[in-house]
Image: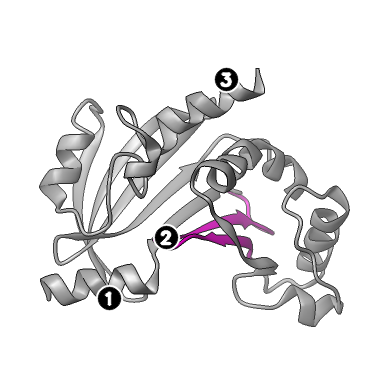
Amino acid sequence: MYKLLLVLLSLNVFSQTKSIQEFDVRNAKWGMSIETVKSLEQYNKDIRLIDTLILNDEINQILQINSLIINNTETNLFYGFRNNRLVKVSFQFVNIDTTNLFNSVLKVYPIFNLLVSEKQMQPLACWSYENESYKKLSGKEACKFKSKFDVDNVEKIAIQHKTIKKVIYSLENKRSIATFLFNINADNKVTELQFIPSSEVKNTIIDKTF
């Protein structure tokens, strides 16, 4: 059953038609144009292109796809483009159990495991916060993704510090960085998974297109 789940996830999250080894995220590769990515997602009816400006990521257009079902979870998908080149992919899991952080972790753990086993991703950073260091605040490191003891302590510290909004855990391989973001102290506790190209790949995209 577990192996079957991994197979289904590989089809839904990373690619639909070929080996997931051939792509960076789903059927897409970093640097693809909007039209190319759009053609890969043409079977999705709820798809729209949004002009925007996200300075941190230097993104000026987003291709948004709503209400996908991934890992039995309603998911919104966002492809971010910089000057018509794909530089970011984000999944928002909108209806998972957010009673506590560990429940959220359990829900996305099959995806985490797939990234490690099929994408050869390794931890880039242990558990931390988007705007603060868990190690600095607690004097400890928490590096196991699926450890209730670690995750509960990470959440406890976050709740104690009202300014902390997101808990994060990052992975990387040669081409991509993947970051899980779990909202803390928020009414709408959406869990996200964000992909960006590695520095080496991003520099290659920039060299060829800008």
Residue at the spot 52% in from the left edge and 40% down from the top edge = 93
Q: Callout 3, which amino acid?
A: Leu
Q: CA distance from mark 3 to mark 1?
A: 37 Å
Neighbor class of circle 2 (other Cα within 10 Å; few <14, some 14-19, many 20+) is many
Q: Residue 170 magenta-drawn? A: yes
Q: Secondary structure at mark 3?
A: helix
Neighbor class of circle 3 (other Cα within 10 Å; few <14, some 14-19, many 20+) is few
Q: Residue furthest top?
A: 1
The answer to which of 161 and 16 lies nearer the viewer is 16
Q: Is 2 on the left or on the right of 100, as rendered?
A: left
Q: CA distance from mark 3 to mark 2?
A: 25 Å
The spot of residue 124 in percent (x, y) is 59, 67
The numbered mark, 2 or 1, whose residue comes first in the sequence reads: 2
The spot of residue 181 in percent (x, y) is 58, 57
The numbered mark, 3 or 1, whose residue comes first in the sequence reads: 3
The spot of residue 48 in percent (x, y) is 20, 42
The spot of residue 128 in percent (x, y) is 69, 69
* Tag shown at residue 203: 1
Query: What residue is disc 2 on?
Result: 176
The answer to which of 166 and 7 lies nearer the viewer is 7
Residue at the spot 65% in from the left edge and 17% down from the top edge = 1
The answer to which of 72 and 190 lies nearer the viewer is 72
What stretch of residues is rendered in magenta? Answer: 165-188
Residue at the spot 69% in from the left edge and 45% down from the top edge = 105
Q: Secondary structure at mark 2?
A: strand
Query: What residue is disc 3 on?
Result: 4
Q: Magenta residues: mostly which secondary structure?
A: strand
Q: Does 95 appear above or below 189?
A: above
The picture quadrant where one finds residue 165 is bottom right
